[in-house]
Image: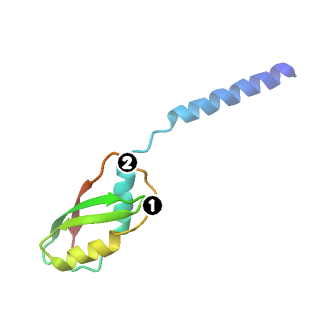
Amino acid sequence: MKKLQLFLLVLAIGFGSAVKAAELPVDPTSAFKYEVEKLLEDLPIELEEEEKEVNLTITFNKNNEIVVLSVECDDPYVKSVIKKRLNYKKVKTQLDKSIKEYKLPIRLKA
């Protein structure tokens, strides 16, 4: 009986470590990009072109909230909508604290 218990214990430890080794680490930048994408879904913007490129420069405050520093775009309405949608939104992803500013290219599609 003791041998069976020992075998099951070794099997459980081996299986647990194998499952842990098989987990892939989550890339924080891709997780953050996904969060921003979700925040920018269904923008109330009608584009004249089929696609518009917008460059964002953001940083984070101590509460891990996005602070929009600039939106590089020729349309002032698009700028204001993006700023309102992203500014001071809390994100779950923890990014590198040593990087003060992040530049994100955003592609808006009609």
Please state the horizontal and vertical placement of residue 50, each as a whole percent of the image: 15, 71
State the residue at coordinates (39%, 52%).
31
Residue 59 visible in the shown view = yes
Residue 51's disc number:
none
**Residue at the spot of label 1:** 63
108 is higher (above) or lower (below) than 24 = below
Is 28 or 57 nearer to us in this picture?
57
Toward which corner of the image does residue 52 lie, by quadrant? bottom left
Q: Residue at x 23, y 62 (%)?
A: 56
Instruction: Residue type at mark 2: give it.
Output: Lys
- Where residue 92 appears, as percent x and y from the top left, is 46, 57
The quadrant of the picture occupied by the C terminus is bottom left
- For the residue carrying disc 1, how many other residues have a C-alpha within 10 Å: few (<14), some (14-19), or many (20+)? few
Kind of residue at badge 1: Asn
Q: Earlier in the sequence, mark 2 or mark 1?
A: 1
Q: Position of residue 67 (x, y in %)?
A: 33, 64
When asked about the image quadrant of residue 74, the answer is bottom left
Residue 68 is left or right of residue 53, and the answer is: right
Residue 97, disc: 2
Q: Give the answer, above or below, for where 98 lies relative to 8.
A: below
Instruction: Out of 88 and 11, give the one closest to the viewer.
Output: 88
Disc 1 is placed on an element classified as: loop
